[in-house]
Each structure stands twice: as C-alpha cells, then as structure tokens.
C-alpha cells in the first residue's frame, strides 16, 4: 500500500508538466506568439504543427528507450530526476522575446519549441509509465491517476489565476512580463518534477525484452484496445486544445479585453481557472463516480455527454462581457465532465498495458503510455494549428515590422473573426466530444 506522500509526489509530476508547462503552452502560447512575440499567424500555425508532430514520432521511441533503462533509481524515475532542470530552463527561454528581426525570431521560436517538445517527452513519457510499475492493484492505480489529475488541475488553477496579477506585479512591457514569469514558473516546474522522481517508488519489475526490437511498435497496431484508446485520447486533447488555444483571442476580441467584476480581474487565464478548479474537484470524485457507474468506459461516456451539451450551449450565449458569469457557469459545467473523465484515460492505459503484457509476454508499458502523451501532443498540435489557420482565414493578420521590430496585428473582418473564435470554443469541441462517445462505445475493454 503506497503512502500518501508517494501519491502527493506522483501528483507533483503532473503539477509541473500538466499544470505549468503544458497549460501555459496550450493556453498562452498561441496569443503570445502572435500578439507579443511577433510571429505571423502562418508561422504560429506551422510552428505548433511541425514541433508537436515531430514529437509525436519521438514519443514511442522514448517509451521503448524508457522500458529498457536500468539504473540505481529504477527504470522510469531517472528520466524525471535528470530531466527536471532542462525542462524548466527551456520553458523559461521560450517565453523570452529576443531583439531579433522576423527571421531571427522565427529561428529562435522553432529551435526552442522543438527542444521543449523533446525534453517534455523525455520527462513525461517515463512519468506516465510510472503508473504501470508503482502498484499492481487496480483501485490503487485509479487513486494514483486521480492524484495525478488533481495535482495537474490544482497547479493549473494556481498558474492561471495568478498570471494576470503577477504580470501587474512585474510591470514593464508584455515581453518583459512573459520573460520574468517564464523564469518563475520554470523554476517551480523543475522543483515539482525533481520531487516526483525522488518521492515515488517502482515496486514492479517490467518484463523486459532482451534487446531493442521494432516488435513492440508493430504489436501496438494489432492491439485493438490501444487503437481505440489512442483515438479517444486524441479526441480528448482536440476538445481541450481548441478551447485552450482560442481563449485568449476570445477575451481580446469578442469580449474586448479583461473583465473586472468587484475588483476581480477576469482575463483569459482566470476564466479558464474556474474550469481548472472544477476539474481538480471532480478529478478527485472520478474514482467514486466510476464505481457508481460500474465501469471506466461507461463513466467516460457519461462525462463526455456533459461536455457535448454544455459546449453546444456556450455557442448561444451573446458575445458580451455583461454575460461573463453565464459564460463562467457553462465553463464550470463543462469542466465537470472533463474532470470526471481525465483520470480515466491514464487508468485505462494501464489496463491496455496489462492486456499487452498478457498477450505478448513482455512489458511494453513505456510504449503504451507514450501513446498517451503522443495523443496529447497530436491533439493539441492539430487543434492549435487549426485555430491559427481558421483565424487567418477569417481575417486575423499578425507579424513583426522588419524596420521597428514591433508586433503588428490587423483584423480585416471583425465579425467573421469573432464568430470563428466563438465557434472554436463551443461548436468545434462539441462535435469532437460526440466522436469521442462513439469511440468509447466501440472500446473493447469493459472493466
């Protein structure tokens, strides 16, 4: 039976990766790159697509490499211990805007974003794989997975809520604010990742293949539960990716800036914070909800239904700051569904890993869990790129003046841009959630 300190330690791993680095990359980076850093919409779309699609390929390779690691710290933990500092450092550099021209900025952004994806993979794939070797008890796996989600959402809540207030505290230009906050949150991410590596334990020994082989990768495509769960994971991250990537634009253009209510500054990060808090609460409720429903698959499906209904409802609310609390309320209801199903994905990957080990005779836990981060990156890569692409089609133009080095944003069709933004936050995710329900219906593991 794992101690509480170990479960908290495991939660700190996703608090660092999911609650800080990935949350900021998903929510703040699109708006940061176009409106602060000075990339064009096309460059931003291509950057997010190329970097994350590149990382989609490296994830399974990293999973296989992690499976074969042998050290005094175990199989997966050393990747967290020694990857903590590079993770925080590169994240901080990504939020720094160098005084380069358009070409120099493009090289800086592409290089560091690629490095960030590689380091994130080297840390997060082994982190996810830890769940498969910390315990053999299925209920305890659900508990670890729940702690993980609560850790991610709790830190996401803190990060997003504090962001506008920390910006005010730092002062100066937006470029200076993002650079300082990048360093600050980079340090916290480093400490959380390191603590996770040091506090967790590997109790189970993977059944290792004798030498490197491509067979585990080939086996994946004969593993029907893996195929369905990976598609579900991609849809899940499409759903989140559209909402996260477009939230900043929604406040900037649909609601015309930050909304202040009784002294509370509600900008796009604070707006999403309401959802993070809800996800944190219902992530903790998820194991109980799953037991009541009777299976992980059915619990996931009912949670996804909540997301379909509430996302569609959001579309019909007027684009007016006067309705801010209605919008917040709908985001909270949507996040009930997200909070309930998020822990289930990782627990279901553990089931798929057990299925693969039983079927093939050797452990492919790292490869299986790497597909979880692969689907995360694939979903956010495509959705983030599509957000930039669709905004560009609707009439959003951005870039850096080659003479003054200043960021320039032009809206050629305000009505079309606003309608596109509103749809990307509501209708697009609703359709994705419907597809996710269909895939869950076909998912073959019923436990």
Image: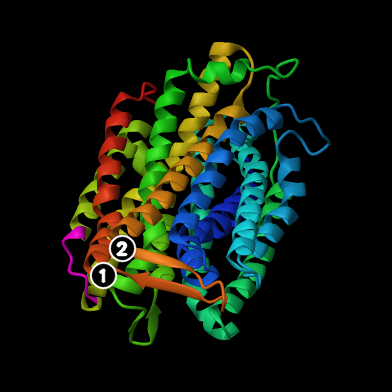
**Circles 1 and 2 in contact, beta carbons < 8 Å:** yes
Residue 398: name its quadrant.
bottom left
Q: Is residue 269 above or below residue 242?
A: below
- Residue visible at 60% across and 19% down? 216
Marker disc for residue 395: 2
Picture coordinates of residue 29, whole percent (x, y): 50, 61
Picture coordinates of residue 222, whole percent (x, y): 48, 15
Q: How many marks?
A: 2
> In what quadrant of the picture does the C terminus appear?
top left
For mark 2, give the secondary structure: loop
**10 Å neighbourhood of mark 1: few (<14), some, or many (≥20)?**
some
In this rendered view, identify the residue nearer to me: 380 or 281: 380
Sequence-first disc among 1 and 2: 2
Quickly name the residue at label 1: 414
Image: magenta residue range: 315-320
Residue 207 appears in the figure:
yes
For mark 1, give the secondary structure: helix
- Residue visible at 41% across and 58% down? 245
- Residue visible at 49% across and 27% down? 351
């Amino acid at each position: 039976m794992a101690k509480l300190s170990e479960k908290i330690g495991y939660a700190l791993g996703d608090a660092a990766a999911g609650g800080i680095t990935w949350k900021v990359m998903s929510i703040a980076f699109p708006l940061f790159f176009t409106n602060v850093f000075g990339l064009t919409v096309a460059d931003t779309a291509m950057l997010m697509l190329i970097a994350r699609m590149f990382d989609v390929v490296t994830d399974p390779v990293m999973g296989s490499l992690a499976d074969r690691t042998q050290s005094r710290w175990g199989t997966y933990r050393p990747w967290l211990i020694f990857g903590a500092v590079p993770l925080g450092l590169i994240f901080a550099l990504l939020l720094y805007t160098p005084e380069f021209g358009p070409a120099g900025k493009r090289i800086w952004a592409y290089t560091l974003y690629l490095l960030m994806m590689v380091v994130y993979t080297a840390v997060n794939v082994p982190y996810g794989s830890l769940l498969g070797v910390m315990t053999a008890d299925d209920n305890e796996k659900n508990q670890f997975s729940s702690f993980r989600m609560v850790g991610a959402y709790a830190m996401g809540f803190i990060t997003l809520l504090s962001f506008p207030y920390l910006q005010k505290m730092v002062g100066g230009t937006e470029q200076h604010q993002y650079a300082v906050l990048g360093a600050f949150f980079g340090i916290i991410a480093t400490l959380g990742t390191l603590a996770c590596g040091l506090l967790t334990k590997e109790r189970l020994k993977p059944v290792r293949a004798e030498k490197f082989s491509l067979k585990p990768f080939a086996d994946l495509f004969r593993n029907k539960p893996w195929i369905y769960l990976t598609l579900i994971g991609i849809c899940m991250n499409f759903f989140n990716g559209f909402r996260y990537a477009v939230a900043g634009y929604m406040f900037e253009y649909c609601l015309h800036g930050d909304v202040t209510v009784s002294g509370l500054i509600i900008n796009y990060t604070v707006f999403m914070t309401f959802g993070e808090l809800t996800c944190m609460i219902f992530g903790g409720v998820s194991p109980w909800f799953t037991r009541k429903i009777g299976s992980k698959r059915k619990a996931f499906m009912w949670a996804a239904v909540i997301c379909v209904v509430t996302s569609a409802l959001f579309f019909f609310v007027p684009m007016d700051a006067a309705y801010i609390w209605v919008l917040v309320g709908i985001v909270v209801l949507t996040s009930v569904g997200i909070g309930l199903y998020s822990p289930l994905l990782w627990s279901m990957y553990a089931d798929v890993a057990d299925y693969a080990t039983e079927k093939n005779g050797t452990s492919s836990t790292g490869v299986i869990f790497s597909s979880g981060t692969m689907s995360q990156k694939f979903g956010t890569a495509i959705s983030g790129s599509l957000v930039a692409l669709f905004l560009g089609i609707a009439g959003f133009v951005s870039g850096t003046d080659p003479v003054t080095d200043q960021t320039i944003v032009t809206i050629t069709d305000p009505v079309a841009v606003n309608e596109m933004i509103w749809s990307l936050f509501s209708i697009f995710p609703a359709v994705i959630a419907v597809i996710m329900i269909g895939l869950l219906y076909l998912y073959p593991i019923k436990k």
